Amino acid sequence: MTTKMLLSIQSLMRLPLSRLSMVSATRCLSQSAWACKSAPQVPPALWKLGRLNHVAIATPDLQASTALYRDVLGATVSGEEDLPEHGVTTVFVTLDNTKLELLHPLGENSPIQNFLDKNKSGGLHHICIEVDNIKAAMEDLKAHKIRCLSKEPRIGAHGKPVVFLHPKDCAGVLIELEEV
Amino acid sequence: MTTKMLLSIQSLMRLPLSRLSMVSATRCLSQSAWACKSAPQVPPALWKLGRLNHVAIATPDLQASTALYRDVLGATVSGEEDLPEHGVTTVFVTLDNTKLELLHPLGENSPIQNFLDKNKSGGLHHICIEVDNIKAAMEDLKAHKIRCLSKEPRIGAHGKPVVFLHPKDCAGVLIELEEV
């Protein structure tokens, strides 16, 4: 399909190009004429952004950070959980509407060690936003030249498919997408 | 009141010292014997942490960052709002359970310019957590040697009292408390 065709479909459907991926256009054209005719004028997006699942905070001192949120700020916190396959130990801080995820390096090749080398006191590491269809999101993002840090979704710390987006393509912010 | 007395009260009430401030102990002791006797064994805390109000993202290119969240990620975004008294222009990104606040410097003495000088692409700047009583929170935090960046709450970007906590006392994270 040419860009011209895609622009034409976009114009007919009054959708911004950014939310009408090649995937959705292809899906419509590959269906029967009847199916396309009977479809609503504005088809649903193939994927949708949802809740902020968590804000991740890297810390060089997990006990002190846990104590801060539990004992000083009065939040409910989980126990420590070692995730050797992810190279981190985690503690979750429950807020009324979302979670903070405290991260501490585990093992020699922890993915957060580099961050802590640059930020000795720790700091805000990434945000995780839920999506309903991670593969559709990845295809759409690729079309917008937003790089994913892995070619396929991986199973994240919560046992669900996740992917990280390149911070240089996201205003300097490391964004994790998690399919829920 | 001596530390010994406070520890004794803490022990009796089975509360962690951290959540039983001098303020709450003083308040109980200054009430009548009847009032203290009839009070529940575990008194309510004088302040409570609530929702994550927003995650603030500093960006050197507000239009590009807004377009990323609106056009690529499909989120609802607000218009730009200049807040000269805070030295920033803001755009809010609505997620299902909270907000992202995009911040761009406004004027010559913007409080986020220093951050952007160090983080050229932008990045996660602070998190804002709601509290129900900001003055009680500040007094409690002071007792725990968590420094506030102002002596009194200030009126924040949303017209409500806010205070920022020193990142060096909060595991490297700049935390804003907002009274709602």
Image (tube, coloured by chain):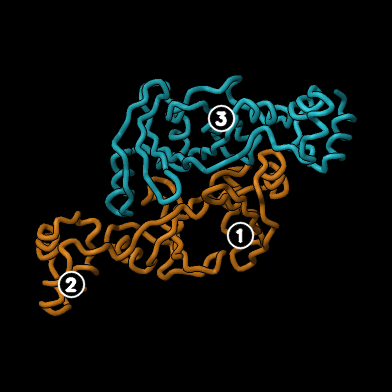
Chain colours: A orange, B cyan
Q: Secondary structure at mark 2?
A: helix
Q: What residue type is disc 3 on?
A: Phe
Q: Residue at position x 49%, y 55% from top?
A: A53
Q: Which chain letter matches label 3?
A: B
CA separation, marks 2 and 3?
51 Å
Depth check, mark 1 against mark 2: the one in front is 2
Is label 2 on the same chain as label 3? no
Disc sitting over residue B163 in the figure: none
Q: Secondary structure at mark 1?
A: loop
Q: Is residue B63 left or right of residue A129?
A: left
Q: Is residue A82 left or right of residue A139?
A: right
Task: Determine which residue is flagged by label 3.
Answer: B164
Depth check, mark 1 against mark 3: the one in front is 3
Percent across and percent down for residue B40 are 77, 39
- Residue B62, image quadrant: top left
Task: Determine which residue is flagged by label 1.
Answer: A110
Q: Residues within 10 Å of mark 1 (few under 14, many from 20)?
A: some
Task: Determine which residue is flagged by label 2.
Answer: A28
Q: Residue at position x 65%, y 55% from top?
A: A91
Q: What residue type is disc 1 on?
A: Ser
Q: Secondary structure at mark 3?
A: strand
Q: Which chain letter matches label 2?
A: A
User: Is there CB contact under 8 Å for labels 2 and 3?
Assistant: no
Is label 1 on the same chain as label 2? yes
- Relative to A56, say whether B173 is above or below: above
Q: Which chain letter matches label 1?
A: A
Q: What residue type is disc 2 on?
A: Cys
> Of the residues under marks 1 and 2, which one precedes in the sequence?
2
- Relative to A75, say whether A143 is above or below: below
CA separation, marks 1 and 3?
31 Å
Percent across and percent down for residue A39 are 17, 70
Q: Is residue A143 left or right of residue B148?
A: left
